[in-house]
RNA sequence: CGGGGUGUAGCGCAGUGGCUAGCGCGCAUGGUUUGGGACCAUGAGGUCGGUGGUUCAAAUCCACUCACCCCGACCA
């Protein structure tokens, strides 16, 4: 490709509305253009990258037994009513009305369509397993798109669905996909880590996410310093340390004027935070829930939400709390009535806690469970933090930031039952097909690749997904020797199957070098009188500081070799 | 949806009631340059987000509205 003909322009200045590195560089390099909030066009060079990722994914899906198909984005709303997932998608679902006043959802995912499709197609265990997949745009009206391509409303996604006869089959399909995903990230040159993930309140058994570790990531990963335990903080668990149980003492009131936070309370009474009980109020689908947890721990809202099986969960507002007859700052699990009490299992680890007295400026000493109060539900609802103890090996847990670039999910039979996706097994028994669902967001992977691979000059593409292999850069374009040599190299390399971006523009060296660094093509070849007098060109990897020279004779083979091996010959 | 912010040329910005709305980059033409964002000359490019209002006079003041960005609750 000749740079002079390329649609897209590089920018010197950082776009005002771009905050993160991938967004800035993608726009500055002329690879994407914003159309609306969370809606982007891919310019030719950005599209090339996306297509490379797409091809790698396609090959790995096929290798794992996937079959590519194509489903529509327009989906009758009835399918969503049938699946019962309408409430959980709520406003993120784009819905449009056709000329007959019929409502259509614009596909945010395709579980509904594929399950319906399979239910009409598969009848016998002989037809299973199946792993259909597609690569196409999804539409989700996210409340807040952000970070350029990191979270958008229209996005390019690979979605594969597995259909199996039993649990063993599902496990096998799941394992195949996990391996395929690992292959995809490895082939893209993007090391991703697999972590345990939250599988939501409705259905779903096991779930894992693939994370690209980068400081700018919005997810937090908890992992063990000793074993291979790794999980999203939403899901992560730890071994809770408990204070030694002492004999319960009689409850007594203590005056604590103006003390409403755990930190203040612990300091005021000269006790550790884990000797106190914290009370937090949530509104779960409108119902106030009283949550008790040991003072040193925090509430994991995802765990709580799953436990309560609710769709909306938020901290109780002042009005909601007051209406329930609770005294914020001094609320107590004792003597409350008509409100659901959920406790973290940490309250069993310890004794003689300090807790609220349910009246202003007063706390209680020596509160013990279950002597002094009852709870409706007891479970692990605590946030796991770095420094906690690994649930598997008792090692120390650590944390890192990451970007989610893939998700695999054991769905079970929830949807197949709804869609009547049953099959007849060997013994003639009717059974629901067991499903799994597996997604990779391509645009996000592309953006995450940049978050992970850039410097202060621009992008540093991993070779397998780079828009071109070689940036061919002649200097002094009024020099006939230079232009002729460059033209010949361009022709030879292209004919040899090497993808070349030929900077044939009449620009100064500074402009060309800066654009080359910004665009981030892995190998740069400079053609100039300086090396041409020795019948050679200068070659440099984008990621390295050091350049070297290669002779003109046999250049094509040499470059091919360099590109294949990643070396310097 | 709550909180914060921004809309002026393709991009980045200046312009707090007054005459023809400016600057830098980019773009076009000509010339001089060429190893890390060169220089000179000439030129094109604007419904100042929109609507309504106040005023002799509005990019500027007021009201409403739209769009976009950032921080929180959701997700690949």
Image (cartoon, coloured by chain):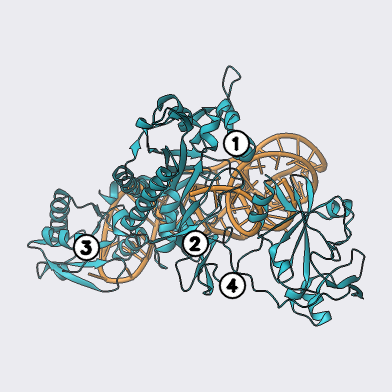
Chain colours: A cyan, B orange
User: Can you name the residue that lies furthest to the top here?
Assistant: A100
A176 in relation to A67, above or below: below
Q: Which mark is residue A108?
A: none
Q: Quadrant of residue A117?
A: top left
Residue A62 horizontal side relative to residue A362, left or right: left
Pinpoint residue A478: horizontal percent, then vertical percent: 19, 59
Question: How far apart are the two marked residues, 4 and 3, measured between alpha carbons?
Answer: 51 Å
Foreground residue among A524 and A158: A158
Which numbered disc, 4 or 1, marks the residue that appears first in the sequence? 1
What residue sits right under mark 2 in the picture? A402
Q: Which residue is mark 4?
A: A388
- Residue pictured at 47% horizontal, 38% vertical: A434
* Residues marked 2 and 4, same chain: yes
Please, which chain is the residue tagged with disc 2 on? A
- Quarter assignment of residue A330: bottom right
Identify the subunit bearing mark 3.
A
Residue on which the image places disc 3 = A525
Q: Residues within 10 Å of mark 4 (few under 14, many from 20)?
A: many
Label pair 1/3, CB-CB below 8 angstroms: no
Measured in 3D between alpha carbons, the distance from the residue under mark 4 to the one under mark 1, in whole angstroms, is 36 Å
Looking at marks 1 and 3 on the same chain, the residue that comes earlier in the sequence is marked by: 1
Q: Where residue A84 sits in the image (x, y, percent)?
A: 61, 33
Precedes in sequence: disc 3 or disc 2: 2
Q: Chain of mark 1?
A: A
The one of A200 and A2 positioned closer to us in this rendering:
A200
Observer able to see residue A113: yes
Subunit ID for the residue under disc 4: A
- Looking at the rendered image, the disc whose residue lies closer to the viewer, 1 or 3, is 1
């Amino acid at each position: 490709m000749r740079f002079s003909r390329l649609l897209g322009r590089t920018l010197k200045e950082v776009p005002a509305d771009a905050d993160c590195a991938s967004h800035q560089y993608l726009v500055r390099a002329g690879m994407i253009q914003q159309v609306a909030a969370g809606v982007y066009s891919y310019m030719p060079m950005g599209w090339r990258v996306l297509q490379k990722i797409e091809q790698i994914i396609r090959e790995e899906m096929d290798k794992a037994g996937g079959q590519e198909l194509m489903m529509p984005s327009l989906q009758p709303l009835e399918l969503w009513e049938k699946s019962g997932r309408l409430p959980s998608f709520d406003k993120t679902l784009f819905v449009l009305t056709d000329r007959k006043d019929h409502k259509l959802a614009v596909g945010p995912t395709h579980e509904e369509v594929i399950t319906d499709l399979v239910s009409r197609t598969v009848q016998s265990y002989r037809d299973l397993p199946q792993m259909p997949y597609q690569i196409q745009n999804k539409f989700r009206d996210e409340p807040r798109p952000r970070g350029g391509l990191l979270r958008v409303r229209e996005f390019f996604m690979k979605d594969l669905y597995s259909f199996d006869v039993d649990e063993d089959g599902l496990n096998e399909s799941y394992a195949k996909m996990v391996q395929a995903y690992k292959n995809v990230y490895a082939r893209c040159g993007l090391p991703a880590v697999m972590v345990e993930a939250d599988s939501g309140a409705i259905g779903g058994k096991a779930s894992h996410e693939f994370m690209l570790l980068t400081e700018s990531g919005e997810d937090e990963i908890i992992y063990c310093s000793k074993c291979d335990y790794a999980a999203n903080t939403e899901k992560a668990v730890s071994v809770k340390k408990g204070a030694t149980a002492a004999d319960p003492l009689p409850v007594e009131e203590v005056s604590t004027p103006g003390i409403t936070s755990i930190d203040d309370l612990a300091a005021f009474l000269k006790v550790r935070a884990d000797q106190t009980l914290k009370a937090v109020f949530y509104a779960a689908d409108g119902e106030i829930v009283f949550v008790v947890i040991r003072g040193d721990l925090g509430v994991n809202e995802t765990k709580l939400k799953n436990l309560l099986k609710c769709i909306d969960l938020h901290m109780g507002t002042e009005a909601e709390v007051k209406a329930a007859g609770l005294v914020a700052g001094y609320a107590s699990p004792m003597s409350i009535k008509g409100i659901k009490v959920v406790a973290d299992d940490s309250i069993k680890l310890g004794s003689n806690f300090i807790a609220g007295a349910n009246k202003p400026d007063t706390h209680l000493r020596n509160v013990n469970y279950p002597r002094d109060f009852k709870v409706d539900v007891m479970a692990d609802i605590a946030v796991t933090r770095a420094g906690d103890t690994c649930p598997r090996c008792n090692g120390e847990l650590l944390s890192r930031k990451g970007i989610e670039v893939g998700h695999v999910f054991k769905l079970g039979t929830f949807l197949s039952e709804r869609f009547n996706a049953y099959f007849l097994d060997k013994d003639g028994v009717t059974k629901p097909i067991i499903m799994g669902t597996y997604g990779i967001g391509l645009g996000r992977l592309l953006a995450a690749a940049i978050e992970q691979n850039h410097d202060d000059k621009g992008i540093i593409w991993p070779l397998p997904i780079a828009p071109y292999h070689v940036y061919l850069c002649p200097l002094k374009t009024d020099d006939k020797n230079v232009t002729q040599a460059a033209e010949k190299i361009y022709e030879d390399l292209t004919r040899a199957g090497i993808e070349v971006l030929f900077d044939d523009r009449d620009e100064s060296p500074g402009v060309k070098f800066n654009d080359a660094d910004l665009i981030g093509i892995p190998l740069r070849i400079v053609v100039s009188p300086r090396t041409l007098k020795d019948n050679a060109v200068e070659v440099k990897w984008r990621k390295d500081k050091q350049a070297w020279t290669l002779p003109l004779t046999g250049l094509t083979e040499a470059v091919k070799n360099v590109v294949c091996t990643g070396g310097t010959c």
